Image (cartoon, rainbow, N blue to C red):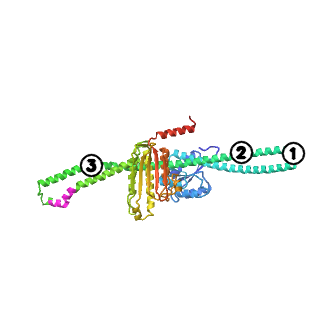
Amino acid sequence: MSSELAEPSTILIVDDTPTNLGVLFDFLADFGFKVLVARDGQSALQKVAYAAPDLILLDVLMPGIDGFETCRRLKANDLTRDIPVIFMTALADTVDKVKGLSLGAVDYITKPLQHEEVLARVNVHMKLRNLSKKLLEQNVCLQAEIEQRVKAESSLLKLALELERRVDERTAELFLSNQLLKQEIQERLQAEAGLQESEAQLRTQAQCLEKAFRELQLTQTKLVQSEKMSSLGQLVAGVAHEINNPVNFIFGNLSYAHDYTKNLIDLVNLYHQEFPAGGQIIEHKIDEIELDFLVEDLPKLLSSMKVGVDRIREIVQSLRIFSRLDESEMKPVDIHLGIDSTLLILHNRVKGRGDRPAIEVVKEFGNLPLVECYAGQLNQVFMNLVANAIDAIDDYNTTRSLSEMKANPSKIFIRTEVTESNRVLIHIKDNGPGMTEEISQHLFEPFFTTKPIGKGTGIGLSISHQIVVDKHGGQLNCISAPNQGAIFIIDIPIHQKNFANNLITMSETALGIS
């Protein structure tokens, strides 16, 4: 809540729903904020022009100018670009959320709104804005102080020259002049020391602001990752569950259908043996339905149906392995199952199309033990790396003819092995176009992407790096050169106990615990 002595912070709420406006207005006003409201983007831009708020809560879907366009115009104006914008949206698509953040928004709140969440996010971004304002004011004061000190130094220099002239002119006052000069020099040294101290404070404040920005960026990345993993896991698990029940029903009844069909065919054959002359009507029906072909083909049809159902059950099992919603904790898992499930999900992207042959996936699996890890998160890393390899190969193939693609087929190599230091290495290699060293250096930075707008968010590799390094105590590296393809190497320990012990030791050292 704002202090009674300080001017209350101003919040502009932009929403085309009167109910939302009323509820948010009363709630925020009760906590001491000055609240302005607008029913659409045009009204919001007009109000900001004559009464700049400290924070804007902006709905995405509105008539006329929507939230994204309103945000873009605010950030394009030098007078309003520094006003923090928080989107209020019911959109669950990660791409829409990332689009809002890339336009300059600092956060988003998902509808239906929770008052505690709204208040918490508003307070956080109000504090960040106040800190930014305070730092700017301190910078202005420090600049003024530096100018004053420069003037003082100039005055000191003039005074020193004047003292030297007096020494030459007044030899009788040499001792007094020397003492005065020493005193002035001491003051100058003190002024310089004060200036150095002020510069050190400025550097410290700049470092604190940079750290806060990095933490905010990391928080945004984690939030997007959490939403993405939750949505993907729920979608995959839901599809697997919905398919599993009817498939199990069909699978369980196929054996009975096979037995019933066999019995009926045996009965027809027996009837035909006992009563070979069945009458003209029966003979006509036998010719009409092609009984001999039906007896021969029906068992084959049931067998092919069983093969199809078995394939569907394999796909469902792979989807369940990939999602692993029931395995949120770290536990020993078979890494190869996760890779196979990922490849099965991406099978439609590697198979051949009219414009290119199929991408061959070469698996060179070593003899791996069970690896302690967060299976669902590690599967997401496999998904990101293999999908990126497919994207790189597809882009590369757009520059090659069909004959060139057949002469040098597209391939993805996946190799696993165990090192002598009880670690697992997973190599994911493609024979695509590769990349320059300059691009390789920025691969794992949040929101960095080489893909066109709308095709990449720039968070996949950053999140993968965070999962491998922070969650599993491992390493994720890339080796690439132009026209040489790319190799991504995942290096994680088999047992996470050593990694946990190292974290505890580092924490105790940081706290000064012996």
Residue 258 at what x, y percent from top left? 23, 50
Helix, strand or loop under label 3: helix
Q: Is residue 154 left or right of residue 427?
A: right
Residue 266 at what x, y percent from top left? 17, 52
- Where does label 1 land, which residue? 173
For mark 3, does the 10 Å Cα neighbourhood hold few (<14), some (14 to 19), or many (20 or more) residues?
few
Residue 486 at what x, y percent from top left? 47, 55
As drawn, 336 above or below 454: above
Q: Is residue 384 left or right of residue 84?
A: left
* 290 falls in the magenta region: yes
Front one among 300 and 40:
300
The residues tagged by marks 2 and 3 sit, at their Cα atoms, a distance apart of 89 Å
Front one among 439 and 99:
439
Amino acid type at image mark 1: Glu
Residue under the point 60% across and 58% down: 77
| Magenta stretch, overall SS | helix
Of the numbered discs in the image, which one, if any, rests on residue 193? 2
Front one among 288 and 324:
324
Quadrant assignment for the C terminus = top right
Are the two marked residues, 2 and 3, in contact with CB atoms closer than 8 angstroms? no
Helix, strand or loop under label 2: helix
Residue 348 seen in the current view: yes
Query: Between tags 3 and 1, which lies in front?
Result: 1
The residues tagged by marks 2 and 1 sit, at their Cα atoms, a distance apart of 30 Å
Amino acid type at image mark 2: Ala
Amino acid type at image mark 3: Asn
- Where does label 3 land, which residue? 253
